[in-house]
Image: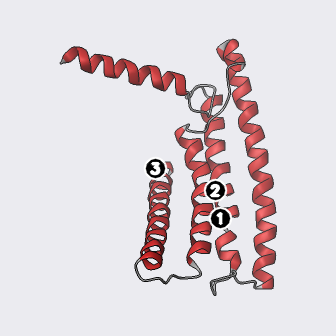
């Protein structure tokens, strides 16, 4: 189930990026070549970017690419680091839960009222439903991370380790140069 969701996430993120590029590029061509353009393009690109960012939260949790400061935590032994990791994930789940709940209420009100976007004849709640979808996926990924830390299947952190990645990259480049 997790692989399926990961494939959907990656495909959807790619689709959002491609749509943003196409809309923006078409507007640049329309503006500078044909001296024209669509009024709704900026609004659509803004919503696509919001979807990309909020949808990317869960993907970032899964792939450990969120930036964080963990120098203090690394001063402790692994069991204590694991406790800090569990606390960080718990706080993140609480935050995502609050955002999910608030998004649910907000999107529900927008749907009942029937407000359309400024420049497009589309219900605004459709675009803002990413608050509920994205936070739901973030909670799912955070609970997976919590379980992985709790069962020691993963290290203590849900963050990326840039220094470790840089050292590994340097070592790989050094090996490649020695083999030549």
- Count neighbours of disc 1 (C-alpha within 10 A) and say few if under 14, some if 14 to 19, many if 20 or more: many
Label for residue 3? 3
Please, what secondary structure does the residue beneath circle 1 have? helix
* Up/down of 60 relative to 33, above or below: above
Q: Nearer the viewer, residue 133 or 68?
A: 68
Query: Which one is nearer the viewer's eye here, 26 or 77?
Result: 26
Q: Please name the residue shown 48% across and 75% down the image.
A: 27
Badge 2 vs badge 1, beta-carbon distance below 8 Å: yes
Q: What residue appears at the point 68 percent right and 19 percent down from the top-left corner?
A: 71
Q: Pinpoint residue 95: horizontal percent, then vertical percent.
A: 78, 47
Element class at badge 2: helix
Camera-side residue of 86 and 157: 157
Vertical placement of residue 130 versus 115, above or below: above
State the residue position of label 1: 130
* Residue at image mark 2: 54
Distance from label 1 to label 3 (Cα)?
21 Å
- First in sequence: mark 2 or mark 1? 2
């Amino acid at each position: 189930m997790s692989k399926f969701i990961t494939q959907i996430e990656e495909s959807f993120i790619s689709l959002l990026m491609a749509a943003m590029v196409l809309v923006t590029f078409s507007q640049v061509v329309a503006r500078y070549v044909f001296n024209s353009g669509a009024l709704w393009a900026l609004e659509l690109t803004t919503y696509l970017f919001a979807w990309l960012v909020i949808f990317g939260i869960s993907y970032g949790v899964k792939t450990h690419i969120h930036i964080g400061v963990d120098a203090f935590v690394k001063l402790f032994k692994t069991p204590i680091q694991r406790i800090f990791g569990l606390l960080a994930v718990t706080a993140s789940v609480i935050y995502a839960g609050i955002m999910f709940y608030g998004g649910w209420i907000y999107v529900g009100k927008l749907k009942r009222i029937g407000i359309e976007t400024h420049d497009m004849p589309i219900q605004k709640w459709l675009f803002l439903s990413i608050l509920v979808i994205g936070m739901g996926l973030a909670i799912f990924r955070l609970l997976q991370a919590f379980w992985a830390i709790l069962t020691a299947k993963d290290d203590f952190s849900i963050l990326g380790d840039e220094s470790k990645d840089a050292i590994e990259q340097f070592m790989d480049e050094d090996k490649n140069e020695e083999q030549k």
